[in-house]
Structure formats: structure tokens, C-alpha cells
């Protein structure tokens, strides 16, 4: 890789506390002591409440990479908007994890996007135009990033960019305040994607009588 050390080594996609094993944590301790990594990290895509609280209790993880976006508003706020919401207040959870001493990096901040659809990814079907129309809304990506970054417990966000226009939009998200107009855009976007966006809250786990992994199917 052309480097003597890694800034962060993530134990990737650990979605249950049991997956963060003592052996993995020991490997990170050894790598850190040897100067091979600067920080020990864990990434979690769902069941974030259980995983982040476990990491905070363990006290060994320097950085957590977690799913976090406007579709995970607090339960009370979402009830006022008559939209489905996860049981966990992710904003409060992120604050709790940050206060434990972990750095917080957030991902999936756009709650879906259109780049892969527009470039013809077959995962989204042979005629992607209708999906682009449902997911795409001018100004929504900018507002979504601003929504995530306005949380003072968020240290940074991982956001995809494929051209210079998106780069400029991402830079704007770091310098512009979150406004009432942004809130209106995201409320409209949430109503639009509500039935089709998986919030990775784990609520559907174990629901299917035939044992189909519903969340995994949605995520695929």
C-alpha cells in the first residue's frame, strides 16, 4: 500500500456486539503498539444502538463509522411528520457514543442516491428513470449532508462524489448553515422515499415466518 502505517483500521461491518471479538480487539492492540495503525476503528451498518453502546463500554475503540442520516430522525419528530421511524433516536445515540471518547464518522448520509442508478447499475432494473425521479430532488443531497454535519457530535462524514459539481456541493455543505428551506426539502424527500428506503434499524429481523433475512434483502 506504500505506507508504513494506517490512520484507521476498521473492523468492518460489525452489526452485533458478539462480532467484535476479543481476538479482533487484541489484534488491533498489537497493531497499534507496533505502530502499524494510529487508531482502532469499528464500522457498523445496522443495530447501531447495540454496537455503539458495546464499543463505548469496552473503551478500546478510537473511531466508530456508523450509518446516520435524516431518515433516522428522533421518534417524536417523525411521528409529527406521520412517517415511519426507527425505535432508536440516532442523534442522541451518536452524542452518547461521542461523549464516551470515540470519534464519530457517519456514512449513508444521503439516505439513498441516484449516481449508481443513473450510470446503469443493473441492480436497480433495466429502466432506472422512474427510480431516479423518485429519489432525485434538487438540493436534497446538499441539505442531507448539512443535516448530518449540524450534529456537533459528528466529526466528519464519508460522502461519495463523482464529479466536480458534487465536490463543490460537498464543500458548500461544510460551510453553509442548515436552514428552514433545507428542512422543508428533507421533509418532502422523506415522504417520497419513506416506503422504499431501508433505515437499517433491524426492526424487521425475525419477522418472516420462513426465515427470509428481510433486512439483508432490502440492503442488497
Image (cartoon, helix red, strand yellow):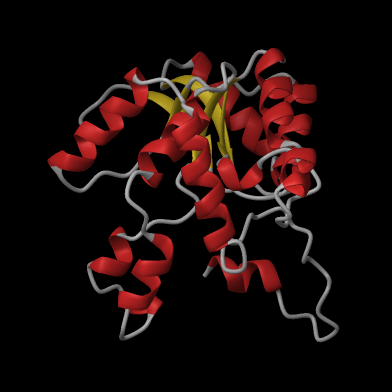
Is there any visible trace of residue 140 in the rendered image? yes
Q: Could you say where residue 33 lies in the image, as x and y percent from the top left? A: 52, 14
Residue at 32%, 77% in the rendered image: 128
Q: Is residue 1 above or below residue 33?
A: below
In this rendering, would 79 be left or right of 190? right
Q: Where is residue 107 drawn, in percent x and y?
A: 48, 40
Left or right: where 11 falls relative to 96: left
Left-right relation of 47 to 120 = right
Q: Is residue 107 left or right of residue 202?
A: left
Q: Quadrant of the N terminus?
A: top left
Kindly indicate the quadrant of the structure image that contains residue 4. top left
- Residue name at image x 81 percent, y 86 percent: 210
Quarter assignment of residue 117: bottom left
Numbered disc total:
0
Residue 151 x, y percent position in the rendering: 57, 22
Q: Position of residue 76 (x, y in %)?
A: 80, 39
- Report the residue at 71% width, 33% height from top: 52
Nearest to the observer: residue 134 or residue 45: 134
Residue 108 visible, this orientation = no
In the picture as drawn, the residue positioned furthest to the left comes out as 164
Residue 43 sits above or below residue 83 on the image: above
Closer to the camera in the image, 65 or 153: 153
Towards the viewer: 111 or 213: 111
Amino acid at each position: 500500500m506504500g505506507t508504513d502505517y494506517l490512520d484507521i483500521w476498521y473492523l468492518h461491518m460489525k452489526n452485533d456486539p458478539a462480532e467484535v471479538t476479543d481476538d479482533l480487539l487484541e489484534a488491533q492492540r498489537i497493531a497499534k503498539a507496533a505502530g502499524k495503525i494510529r487508531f482502532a476503528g469499528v464500522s457498523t451498518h445496522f443495530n447501531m444502538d447495540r454496537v455503539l453502546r458495546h464499543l463505548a463500554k469496552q473503551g478500546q475503540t478510537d473511531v466508530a463509522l456508523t450509518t446516520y442520516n435524516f431518515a433516522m430522525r428522533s421518534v417524536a419528530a417523525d411521528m409529527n411528520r406521520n412517517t415511519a421511524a426507527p425505535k432508536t433516536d440516532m442523534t442522541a445515540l451518536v452524542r452518547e457514543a461521542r461523549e464516551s471518547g470515540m470519534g464519530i464518522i457517519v456514512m449513508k448520509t444521503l439516505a439513498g442516491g441516484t449516481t449508481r442508478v443513473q450510470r446503469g447499475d443493473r441492480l436497480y432494473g433495466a429502466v432506472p428513470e422512474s427510480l431516479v425521479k423518485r429519489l432525485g430532488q434538487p438540493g436534497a443531497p446538499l441539505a442531507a449532508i448539512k443535516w448530518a454535519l449540524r450534529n456537533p457530535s459528528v466529526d466528519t462524514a464519508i460522502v461519495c462524489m463523482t464529479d466536480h459539481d458534487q465536490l463543490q456541493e460537498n464543500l458548500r455543505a461544510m460551510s453553509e448553515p442548515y436552514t428552514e428551506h433545507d428542512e422543508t426539502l428533507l421533509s418532502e424527500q422523506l415522504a417520497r422515499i419513506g416506503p422504499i428506503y431501508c433505515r437499517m434499524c433491524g426492526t424487521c429481523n425475525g419477522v418472516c415466518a420462513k426465515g427470509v433475512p428481510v433486512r439483508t434483502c432490502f440492503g442488497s
